[in-house]
Image (cartoon, helix red, strand yellow):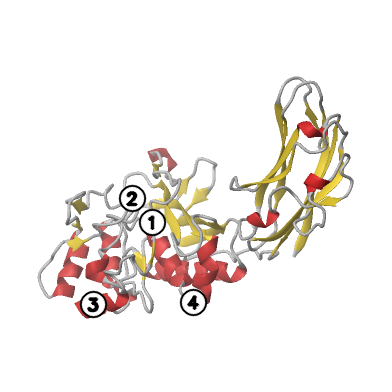
Amino acid sequence: MRQLFQSSTPFTISAQGRSVVRSALEVTGFGGPVEALGVRINVEHTYTGDLVVVLENPVGDRVLLLSNRGGSGDDLAFTTFLDNATVPVGSGSAPFDGTYRPEGRLAAFNGGIANGTWQLLIADTADQDGGTLLGWELEVEAAGPAPEPAPPASNSLIAVRFGGGLTPSQREAFSVAAAQWSTVITSRLPAVRLNDGRIVDGIEITASATRIDGPSGILGQAGPEFLRPGTLIPATGVMQFDTGDIAQLEQDDGLVDVIVHEMGHVLGIGTLWAANGLIRGSGSANPVFTGTQASAAFGTLIGEGPTPVPIANTGGPGTREGHWRESVLGNELMTGFLNNGPNPLSALTVASLEDIGYEVNQAAAEAFALPTRLELAMMGVWAEPASQTCCTLGGINRLEPTVLPDTAIVS
């Protein structure tokens, strides 16, 4: 689907000293990442050789359109930039009234978020000459339009709000994951009023896809955003996935497992263990989760009495001490790596939710047994480098959750 977005708001480019003008366009209505772009600008200026023109996407990535071209010539008169244009902009001359290949490649935006605020930046790099940005257009090609998600059922614990970058089938995977966790957790949570006035009576998750580090790296990042006072049970959370990985995961039938995993972090698995005082030996070679219910479940797995659960003792922030230990629990859903084949949500993970304050349905747990050493080796657990793709729930730019005030509880 292709849409044209336009701005006709004029912006003055000062003739006094160096200056930068920014003009924003709000792009909406797409259900997937950028597939192609075109840009047209209309600028009056008495010395185009002073100008540098840049396009910026909603996450801050930039492509250079024009840099100090045209010398003392006037204007950029409805200048169009397309990657497949025959003439490079460096070979053009003012007023550039045609179609040119930009200095950079607009294809650099492909695969990134389409929906959001795009900005055109015009820098005047010299004194004396000035002008006006009269308007500009952005033509975006991406999948869409995205259907509105169905409202959650009245007995659903989790409601998902969608940001940009996700296709309809990927949104459906979020619905499947939310339904699974809503079966595991039976709590009736107190309603809270958020800072923006909205009332949340379950857990509201904002989900999106964007570029993190490209394919075969960090799958995603997730965590709670606002917590209920007293219990620290989340009210809202954020889930963000790498666009470089999400399409491949869907093709490999691994997407639902990853979304269920990351949704577990929003619920507090790994992200709220320390806040609830449930980690012993933090920073040591053998950190463990000490929750009573999970310890009993782990004891059952190893054929002994209640035993603290080994948690991740390797990896960077967001992996270490935020997951079950891969070398012990292998393909259990909440270890730090996605394994080929099934990744069961076990009774151990369900029990850990009870330890952080939820009421749970143990019957919703999936069958799981501790893997043997041979099975762990076949999963690639000790491979160097690791053969699985990792989750770093601490993520990039993820803020620590905020505890809402007592007055946020809605009577």
Q: Please tell me whether mark 2 sits on a helix, a strand or a loop.
A: loop
Q: Would residue 82 appear left or right of 223 to someone viewing this image?
A: right
Q: Is residue 245 above or below residue 134?
A: below
Q: Quadrant of residue 305?
A: bottom left
Disc 1 and disc 2: Cα gap in Å?
A: 7 Å
Residue located beneath label 1 in the image: 392
Q: Secondary structure at mark 3?
A: loop
Marks 3 and 4, the one that precedes in the sequence: 4
Q: Which residue bears the numbered disc 2? A: 317
Q: Is residue 292 left or right of residue 140?
A: left
Query: How many numbered marks, from 0 up?
Result: 4
Q: In this rendering, would 266 be left or right of 175?
A: left
Residue 153 seen in the figure? no
Label 4 vs 1, first from the N-terminus: 4
| N-term-proximal mark, 2 vs 4 | 4
| SS at circle 4 | loop
Relative to 363, is 30 above or below? Answer: above
Q: Residues within 10 Å of mark 4 (few under 14, many from 20)?
A: few
Q: Measured along the vertical axis of the image, is residue 409 above or below residue 261?
A: above
Point out the tag, 3 or 1, that comes first from the N-terminus: 3
